[in-house]
Amino acid sequence: MMIDLPSQPGTYCLVFHCSTSSPVTIGKLGTYQIKPGYYCYIGSAFGPGGLKSRINRHLQINKRHHWHLDYLRPHLTPVEVDYSTDTIKRECQWAELLLEDEQSSIPIKKFGSSDCNCPAHLFHYKLKPQIKTFLERCATVIL
């Protein structure tokens, strides 16, 4: 799956759906039981190719495992991409907003946040979250 995105740098939120429970080994983080529901992954793309390159890589299933999301991705169906081309890296700020959401929980501690002090950059929701409510200035792609 490839979607048309800007090649600019930016911050993104990927929303996925999971329909079944299954054990997943996430690199050095260990093995976890993922459960049905929605998963929101927050990341940033300030390297070569920007948002287009990073998000389209995350949407692929068969690839070398580099990021935590690569291990989890085969178990998830993408449903929405939200992003900002703001030149300021906002992933920790966005993760903090999801952490404060009463509907969210952290399914795997330190997932996607091994290079910062955030508890995680992956959040689980029982029902589809309304991410757009706090990312009002972001572009959205419904998949």
Image: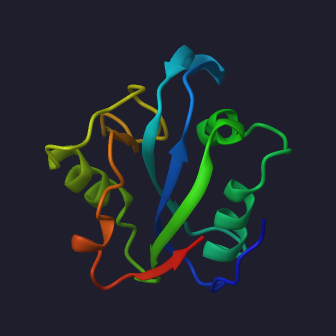
- Quadrant of the image occupied by residue 91: bottom left
The quarter of the picture where residue 124 lies is: top left
Q: Is residue 113 visible?
A: no
Q: Is residue 105 left or right of residue 67?
A: left
Q: Nearer the viewer, residue 117 or 143?
A: 143
128 up-or-down from 64: above or below: below
Residue 64, image x and y in percent?
84, 40
At x 39% / y 28%, what residue is drawn?
Answer: 107
Give the percent coordinates (x, y) of residue 109.
38, 26
Of residues 123 and 86, the one drawn nearer to the viewer in this rendering: 123
Q: Is residue 22 left or right of residue 98?
A: right
Rendered position, 84 above or below 47: below
Image coordinates for residue 129, horizontal then vertical, percent: 31, 56
Q: Identify which residue is drawn at 30% across, 73% down.
A: 132
| Image coords of residue 92 (percent x, y) | 32, 54
Q: Is residue 123 above or below residue 71?
A: below
Q: Nearer the viewer, residue 115 or 64?
A: 64
